């Protein structure tokens, strides 16, 4: 499988990405899982709600702060762009609010 990079825009994961080529095994697993949930990066498909494991991963890496005003664990991201490059596929996901 080609390397997959998921880029998040808006919401609690704004500005962060998941890379299936990361040296972090937890990030690799999360990248593959999220890619699968987007129907392999199909435009218009998305992640209806980030899993508890995804939130745990994000908190551990400093991406989320449940004590921050406006934090909502029911975040929804939708694929808005995809570029298939020679060595990797980049999938852009935009925040669409709570479920």
Image: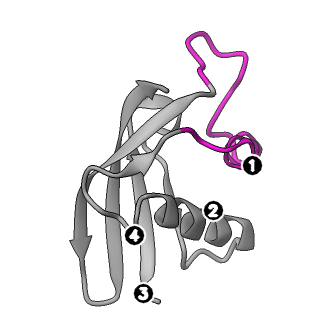
Counting every numbered tag in the picture gives 4
Is disc 3 surrounded by few (<14), some (14 to 19) or many (20+) residues within 10 Å? few
**Whole-number angstrom distance, CA of label 1 to CA of label 2:** 9 Å
Q: Which residue is drawn at 35% across and 48% down?
A: 93
Mark 2 — residue? 30
Mark 4 — residue? 40
> Magenta stretch: dominant SS?
loop
Q: In this view, does 16 lie above or below 23?
A: above
Q: Are marks 1 and 2 in contact (CB under 8 Å)?
A: yes
Q: Are marks 3 and 4 in contact (CB under 8 Å)?
A: no
**Whole-number angstrom distance, CA of label 2 to CA of label 3:** 15 Å
Mark 1 — residue? 53
Q: Which of marks 2 and 4 is in front?
A: 4
Q: Do the residues labelled 2 and 3 touch (CB within 8 Å)?
A: no
Per the rendered image, the range of residues in magenta is 49-72
Question: Quick one: label 3 or label 4, which is nearer the N terminus?
Answer: 3
Mark 3 — residue? 2
Q: Please identify the quarter of the rendering in which residue 41 is found.
A: bottom left
**Whole-number angstrom distance, CA of label 1 to CA of label 4:** 20 Å
Residue 21: x and y, percent? 54, 79
Question: Quick one: label 1 or label 2, which is nearer the N terminus?
Answer: 2
Is disc 2 surrounded by few (<14), some (14 to 19) or many (20+) residues within 10 Å? some
**Whole-number angstrom distance, CA of label 2 to CA of label 4:** 14 Å
Q: Do the residues labelled 1 and 4 touch (CB within 8 Å)?
A: no
């Amino acid at each position: 499988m080609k390397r997959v990079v998921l880029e998040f825009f808006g919401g609690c994961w704004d500005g962060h990405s998941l890379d299936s080529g990361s040296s972090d095994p937890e990030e690799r697993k999360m990248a593959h899982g999220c890619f699968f949930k987007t129907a392999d990066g199909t435009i218009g498909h998305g992640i209806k709600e980030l899993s508890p494991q995804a939130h745990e991963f994000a908190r551990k890496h400093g991406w989320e702060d449940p004590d921050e005003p406006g934090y909502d664990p029911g975040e929804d991201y939708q694929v808005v762009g995809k570029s298939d490059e020679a060595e990797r596929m980049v999938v852009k996901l935009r925040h669409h609010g709570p479920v």
